[in-house]
Image (spheres, grey):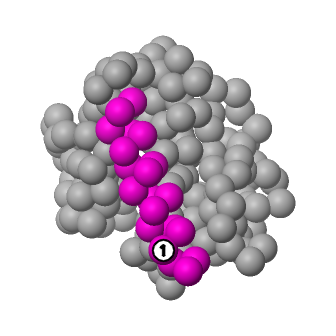
Amino acid sequence: MKFIPLERSHISGIMEIDRLAFPEPWSKKLWIKESAQSLRSYYVAIDNCDVVGYGGGLIAATDFHITTIAVRQTDLNRGIASRILTELLEAAIGMGATDLTLEVRVGNLPAQALYRKFGMVPAGIRRAYYQPDNEDALIMWANDIDQSPYLEQLSSIKKTLACRESVSHD
C-alpha cells in the first residue's frame, strides 16, 4: 500500500468513498479547488491502484485543521486512517503547524478513539454542526505537535504501524 499526496486523478476514487462515508459528500468541484489550494495537505492510500482512503486539512496560522478523513468500508481496521494521519501530521509540522484540531461527530466513537491515540483531547462542542441531521460536533485539539513529546508519540505510532504492516505481509 502507498500513501501519497492527492493528485487530480485520485478524485473519482475519493468521491466513491466520500459518498458512502458522509451524508453530504464534497462535490468534484470542491475537491478540485481544495487540492489546488496552497496551505492544504491531502493524502490518499492506494492499494492495487485503487484509492482506499484519504484525508486532509489546512493550515491557518500555526493550527492544522483536519477537514476530512475516510477509509473505504471494506478496508476499515487495517490501520489506514492512522497511516494517513501520520502523513498529514508530518506534512503539517513541515508547514509550520504547532497545534492540531478537528471536529468529529459526537456519535462517531471509533473516530474519536483514533484521534485520542494521536493525543487529541475534547475541547468543546459545536451544536448542530453536521447537516442534514443536526448532530453535534466534538471539537478536539492536540497542542505542541512540533515538540519532542508529541514527535516521540508520533514516531511510536509509526513504528507500531510499520510492525503491523510487516506482520500482515508475512
Q: Position of residue 81 (x, y in %)?
A: 46, 60
Q: Which residue is mark 1?
A: 167
Instruction: Say above or below: 52 vs 150.
Output: below
Q: Quadrant of the N terminus?
A: bottom right
Give the residue furthest to the bottom. Answer: 74
Q: Is residue 66 magenta?
A: no
Left or right: 138 in relation to 115: left
Give the residue furthest to the front. Answer: 170
The residue located at (67%, 42%) in the rendering is 34
**Quarter assignment of residue 145:** top left
Q: Main secondary structure of the magenta part?
A: helix
Which amino acid type corresponds to the residue marked 1 in the rendered image?
Val
Q: Quadrant of the C terminus?
A: bottom right
Q: Position of residue 126 (x, y in %)?
A: 23, 42
Left or right: 126 in relation to 7: left
The residue located at (71%, 33%) in the rendering is 37
The residue located at (53%, 34%) in the rendering is 90
Q: Position of residue 65 (x, y in %)?
A: 44, 34
Q: Is residue 158 magenta?
A: yes
The residues colored magenta run 151-170
Whether residue 67 can be seen here: no
**Quarter assignment of residue 105:** bottom left
